[in-house]
Image (tube, grey):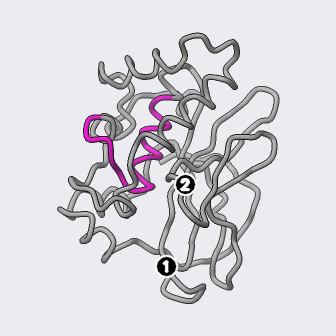
Amino acid sequence: MHQYLESSEHIDWNAPEVSSKAKSLAFGAVAPENVAENCFVFVRDQIKHSWDYECNPVTCKASEVLKYGTGYCYAKSHLLAALLRANGIPAGLCYQRLTISNDRPPYCLHGLNAVYLKDHGWYRLDARGNKEGVSAEFCPPVERLAFPIVSVGEADLPEIWASPIEPVIELLQTRKTYQEVANNLPDIELLSSSKTPRSTSM
């Protein structure tokens, strides 16, 4: 479980501003589950989704997302993982393969999180930000994710990654604007699908 608590290049919870925000979100919380909810709600509601709000710059590291207050789903998941880990709560990264529009190809990856809660085990949550037609909530053990799997070719990818996957890092580090990111969203070849997450590392 230690890999889901580590500070790393992109989940840099040991950055002073990230650890300070994590501490403030934990203040007054009576249990880890309450801390996890506070962190989730903060990232979901206070960090702007770059596409929804047409925001630059493109962020990747948790500390960048917090500094600029914006990020794509991938970057927001990096910040949420960092805030949770800074509070001693194991957290990883998950991905879905979704249609980009109109429930048909092309597809792209969508980033979200899994948090380990003592009473529930691994629980997925999605802090990409709510809007019309998108409503993600924190209500374990029931998952309330932003996007259901509804179309052929879509899938819940089962892994829980300790670090972001390479296509996501390449995207966020090479594209300069939110529009460039939107024009180059990553996809993967789908070999199998599962709704049961499993842990892994990278």
Q: Mark 2 Cα within 10 Å, few/some/many (few <14, many 20+)?
A: some
Q: Report the residue that reaches farthest toward the left.
A: 176
* Residue assigned mark 1: 100
* Residue assigned mark 2: 130
Nearer-N-terminus badge (2/1): 1
Q: Which region of the structure is painted magenta?
A: 67-83
In the picture, measured across the screen, residue 92 lies left or right of residue 51, that is right
- Work out whether 62 lies above or below 93: above
Residue 50 occupies quadrant = bottom left
In the picture, measured across the screen, residue 86 lies left or right of residue 183, that is right
How much space separates mark 2 and mark 1, taking CA atoms? 17 Å
Helix or strand or loop: what does disc 1 sit on?
A: strand
Magenta-colored segment: predominant secondary structure: helix
- Work out whether 187 lies above or below 124: below
**Amino acid found under the numbered disc labelled 2:** Asn
Residue 28 is inside the magenta segment: no
Nearest-to-viewer mark from 2 and 1: 2
Q: Mark 1 Cα within 10 Å, few/some/many (few <14, many 20+)?
A: some
